[in-house]
Amino acid sequence: MRTIAETGSTNADLIALARDGAAEGLWLRAERQSAGRGRQGRAWASPAGNLYASTIVRLRPTDPPAATLALVAAVAVEETVRLFLDGELALKWPNDLLLGGAKLAGILLERADDAVVIGFGVNLAHHPQDVDRPATSLAAHGAAPEPALFLETLAEIFARWLARWRGEGLAPVRERWAARAHPRGTALTARLPDGSEIDGLFERLDADGALVLRLAAGTMRVIHAGDVFLI
């Protein structure tokens, strides 16, 4: 596990290291990021006191689909946060963690040949105020662990879930995700990669971890990629 004072992006750093042969299990944490990013290239504010960390998973031929590592990362973050604060936590597909309906953590997966780099951003001490969706931090709810301690715990929990994903398949991960997600029937908007939007009610995850929405007509729509928002 490596810690640096500042970098542009821990994900970008580990993508470069992965291409140079870095092993699975390497973690990199930065106290600050100058070019942090979220899904679809959105900027991620990175003041000191929050968690900015990435790790490498080397894919094996027998692994479940790489995209389902988003669910592995999500359940690991939720379990870690719950050790520090047992509040109104809920997972939102595919891998955002909400606290009281506001975003507490986000996860970014990026591929580098046979490696997947997974970046974790968790609002421990601070959260942005000027964003289009509500955000919060653990400090705002009375619990603000040090980033190093939080990451030590997260790394252990992530390793355990990764082992289950490899050894038992996606089913136990999907079951845990569903148990910690917003309730069935939650109204959601899915913004698809082509820019279109679909409104529906959360139904379930399918066997491959895709989001299933119940539309107004009663039909089901399976979402494999996109951004999801609470209505």
Image (cartoon, rainbow, N blue to C red):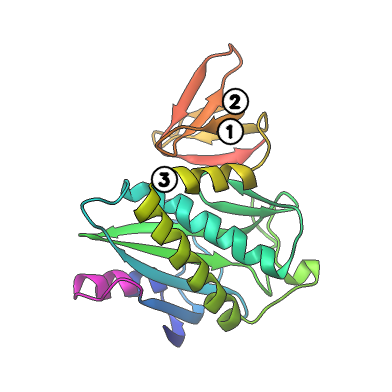
Above or below for 2 versus 11 = below
- Earlier along the polypeptide chain: callout 1 or callout 2? 1
For residue 20: magenta? yes
Check the picture and name the quadrant holding the C terminus: top right
Q: Which residue is mark 2?
A: 200
- Report crowding for label 2: few under 14, some 14 to 19, many 20 or more residues within 10 A (C-alpha): many
Q: Which element carries disc 2, helix, strand or loop? A: strand
- Asked if the residue under mark 2 is in contact with the one under mark 1, i.e. CB atoms within 8 Å, the reply is no
What segment is highlighted magenta in the picture? Answer: 14-25
Q: Is residue 93 above or below residue 96?
A: above
Which mark, residue 178? none
The answer to whether one can see residue 37 in this image is no
Q: What whole-number distance in Å separates the C-alpha atoms at marks 1 and 3?
A: 25 Å
Answer yes or no: is residue 124 visible.
Answer: yes
Q: Image quarter for residue 143?
A: bottom right
The 10 Å Cα crowd at callout 3, few under 14, some 14 to 19, many 20 or more, is many
Q: Position of residue 89 (x, y in %)?
A: 70, 53
Q: Which residue is mark 1?
A: 189
Which marked residue is nearer to the observer: mark 1 or mark 3?
3
Q: Determine if the magenta segment contains residue 53.
A: no
Residue 170's disc number: 3
Identify the residue at the far right of this view: 142
Helix or strand or loop: what does disc 1 sit on?
Answer: strand
Q: Which residue lies at the image location 71% right of the left edge and 76% below the top edge?
A: 144
x and y, in percent, of residue 23 in the image? 26, 74
